[in-house]
């Protein structure tokens, strides 16, 4: 079904995704200048989870993005981290939005965070735009891609970095310690979206995410695919190539998708899957 998407429609979707990612970036920068209010989501035993902060910027940016989508694509569904509202359930199009990915980094002023916009058609990523506070270009900006095209950073084509003289490349692991796979220099950024963008750009080789939500990685999956990267998810039969969020989610709802993920350069993905099988 998704092959029927007209190129003109795809380009319009990609342009809006780019604009919305830039909006997220502007609001994040403005929020830091005024010291945003912070609260913590509910945790166990009726208390707060100090591992799950949310700032006023998270909520404000998602509200802005939803308002823009209601204007531009009222027939499309929206899945966001900060609001459970689903305006068009059953639509073939779903916008997966993470207004601030890496909130703990953001509220502490640590410049590794992102704003991620992913667009799914029938559950499969067809466009992604991820604003990153840091990049291969040593400045903030948006990595973006559409199905069938390459990777761009602020509308300029990106040739993924790859220095053959580097024999031990960077891997993103939750446990960035001596217990991490020895084939890579372990890094933990605190943002799945920014790691997807770094993998697409060739800054990182591979990453493993334990159980992300669709909004964490939908935009990043589109970027990784644009540069020929491989994505695998863990199911009952082991590590399998990722097809789409709906096919892997209960009741076919990407909002309920949560699976372990390995993604990166194909050879690195195969190697890491073998090590963790």
Image (tube, helix red, strand yellow):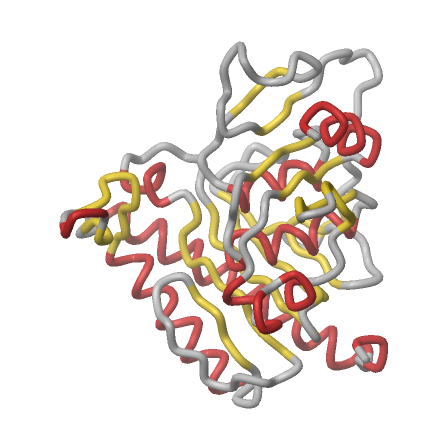
Q: In this rendering, would 27 be left or right of 201?
A: left
Which residue occupies the foreground of this view, 21 or 76? 76
Q: How many marks?
A: 0
In the rendering, at what x and y percent does residue 66 appear?
43, 76
Q: Nearer the viewer, residue 81 or 235?
A: 235
Residue 51 in view (yes/no): yes
**168 above or below 215?**
above
Where does the image place residue 80, in percent across and percent down from the top left?
44, 66
In the image, taking residue 61 as reference, residue 263 lies left or right, namely: right
- Front residue of 206 and 11: 206
> Looking at the image, which residue is at 68% across and 31% down?
206
On-image quarter of the C terminus: top right
Q: Residue at x 57, y 52 (%)?
A: 217
> x, y (%) of residue 99?
42, 58
Query: Foreground residue, 13 or 212?
Result: 212
Is 166 drawn above or below residue 17 in the view shown? above
Q: Residue at x 53, y 65 (%)?
A: 96
Which residue in the rendered view is the most extreme toward the front? 236
Residue 57: x and y in percent read 30, 57
Q: Dividing the picture into quarters, in which one does residue 6 lie?
A: bottom right
Residue 14 visible in the displayed image: no
**Quadrant housing the N terminus:** bottom right
What residue sits 59% from the left and 67% below the top? 17
């Amino acid at each position: 079904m998704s092959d029927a998407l007209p190129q003109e429609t795809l380009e319009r979707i990609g342009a809006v995704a780019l604009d919305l990612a830039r909006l997220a970036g502007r609001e994040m920068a403005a929020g830091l200048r005024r010291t945003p209010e912070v609260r913590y989501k509910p945790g166990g035993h009726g208390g707060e989870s100090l591992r799950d902060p949310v700032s006023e910027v998270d909520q404000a940016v998602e509200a802005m993005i939803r308002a823009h989508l209601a204007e531009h694509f009222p027939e499309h569904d929206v899945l966001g981290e900060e609001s459970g509202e689903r305006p068009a359930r059953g639509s073939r199009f779903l916008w997966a939005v993470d207004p601030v990915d890496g909130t703990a980094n953001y509220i502490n002023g640590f410049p590794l965070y992102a704003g991620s916009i992913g667009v799914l058609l029938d559950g499969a990523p067809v466009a992604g735009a991820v604003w990153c506070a840091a990049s291969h270009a040593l400045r903030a900006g948006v990595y973006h891609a559409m199905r069938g095209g390459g990777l761009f950073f602020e509308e300029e084509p990106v040739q993924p970095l790859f220095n053959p003289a580097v024999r031990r490349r960077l891997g993103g692991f939750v446990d960035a310690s001596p217990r991490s796979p020895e084939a890579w220099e372990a890094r933990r950024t605190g943002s799945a979206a920014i790691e997807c963008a770094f993998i697409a750009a060739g800054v990182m080789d591979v990453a493993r995410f334990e159980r992300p939500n669709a909004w964490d990685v939908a935009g990043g999956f589109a970027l990784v695919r644009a540069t020929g990267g491989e994505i695998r998810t863990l199911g009952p039969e082991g590590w399998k190539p990722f097809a789409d969020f709906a096919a892997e989610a209960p009741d076919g709802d990407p909002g309920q998708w949560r699976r372990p993920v390995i993604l990166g350069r194909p050879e690195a993905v195969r190697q890491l899957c073998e090590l963790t099988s």
